[in-house]
Amino acid sequence: MSVLAEIAARSRAAAQDADAQVLALAGRQVLDTMACVALGATHPLPGRWLGLLEPGPPASARAVGVAGRWSQVTAVEIESTLAHLDEFDPLHGPAAVAPGAAVVPAALLTGAARHASGADVARAVVAGYEAVVEAALRCGGPDLYARGWWPTALFGALGSAAASALLLGLDEADTTTALALATAPLGGLLSGDDLGDGHYLLCGRAAAHGAWSARAALAGLTASDTLLDGPAAAAFGRTTAPPSPQGAPHLAATTLKSWPCARPLHTVLAALDDLAADGVHPAPGGTVEIALPSAALRFVTDTRRPASPVDAAASAAVAVAGAVAGRARDPRWYRAAGSGGIALPDIAVRLCASQNLDGLFPARWGADVTVRAPHGTLSGRRRRLTAPGDPAAPLTDEAVLAKAATVAGLPTGAPVLERLLNLADEPDSAVVRAALVGSLNGRTAWTLRHLEPTAAQHLPLAQGADELDP
């Protein structure tokens, strides 16, 4: 059996075996991801990008937080891109992939188009997470960073393909074909300097191609199912690993982030919180020394002058300054820092690799943080191996709802947030998705104001909230 066939079988089995507890976890992932989509709609990037996409006919899909009508595949591309823009979406640490952005929009859009039950969509999310995470784990996970690859861009299409295939009713053989079609254009290079907008567009393009691949398999298109055997091994410079041990689905090991920045910085910020609780705070003229796993240094910097919000979210200096200002959890902090709108305090931030942490990575994305006062006097030191939101330290449902309300800009207790959290209880996912679109798409004037006039004229204002089409 080929690797892709094994992944197809595994994803379908994970969906079939998902019990009420797993489906509840899927609802948390859906809620968190779609809140990040809403947040991404207010990011500067959509104003430069949406006008380049081809609008759909009047009866086609709407994307959450964005004006206009789009083909279903384009709507997946939009939402998957928006979900990851602020680095606040779910992450599977051991696989180094962002499965929520890759899977959830495709599952929710495909399910809503077919009026699938919320439970069916939740099972599709489980299947999609299983596929994208398993593919990344078997092909190297975080080790791919050192070879210049971004795992989410590489394997995101497999996640959206598996989720869409389940909702389209494909059998195991056709699901394998969908994964093969999703794998055929596999790629996604990780920049060695400025990430730029191109980095974030990769996630949406991969998710859109995966959703298309499931439909292509349904239409009878074919592709080789051995692409992750010999060809991928040659491309990645390593043999494909054996299947992961059976047990809880990969979705259960996925982190819900507590900070909108690069994942290695989360344990740094958690350590700074611990030190602050002990009365230790970085001070002007002082230094914060940060030791991380070697692989984590591949996509974290200490720059004080990030070129964009993208680079600000990867800057330890910006994150430390945010902690000092009490704004490390605020996406606007990183956006402002990336546009030159914030002067960082005079606190030196130094990054280095830790062999001790290397031995725990990628199961633990740990950090050793040392705070020194001016003239080098030791103020405090703390090691953190987990951060709030990690599987070992999960957020409560109340915390997930509070984050979603803040991130999406909705009132605390908004009914649509509870419905997404309890998605498996919903008889028709189209109704829930319509409620989400109706709650958020009145804010589309922001996007329209930031589009060039020639692009904005192709984006009609969103229709009323009472429509049930996605």
Image (cartoon, helix red, strand yellow):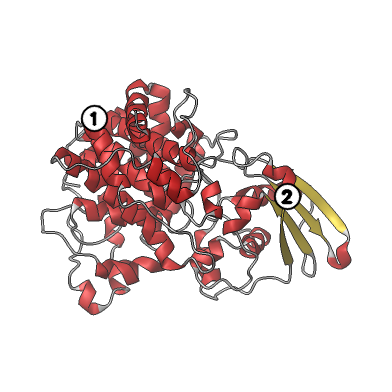
Q: Nearer the viewer, mark 2 or mark 1?
A: 1
**How far apart are the two marked residues, 2 and 1, measured between alpha carbons?**
45 Å
Residue type marked 2:
Ser
Residue found at x 29% / y 55%: 77
Say whether residue 13 is left or right of residue 433. right
Figure check: 54 above or below 119: below
On residue 135, the disc is: none
Q: Closest to the observer: 276 or 382?
A: 382
Residue found at x 33% / y 38%: 226
The first of marks 2 and 1 along the sequence is: 1
Q: Closest to the observer: 116 or 91?
A: 91
Say whether residue 375 is left or right of residue 340. right
Residue type marked 1:
Ala
Figure check: 412 above or below 320: above
Residue 175 locus on image (x, y percent) = 25, 34
- Residue 93, by quadrant, is top right
Say whether residue 32 is left or right of residue 48. right
Residue 401 locus on image (x, y percent) = 45, 41
Asked if residue 98 can be seen in this view, the reply is no
What SS does tag 1 mark?
helix
Figure check: 371 above or below 224: below
Residue found at x 44% / y 53%: 407
Say whether residue 217 is left or right of residue 206. left
Residue found at x 74% / y 67%: 348
Q: Looking at this rendering, what residue extends furthest in the left direction?
A: 58
Q: Closest to the observer: 292 or 386?
A: 292
Q: Mark 1 Cα within 10 Å, few/some/many (few <14, many 20+)?
A: few
Residue placed under numbered mark 2 in the picture:
354
What SS does tag 2 mark?
loop
Residue placed under numbered mark 1 in the picture:
173
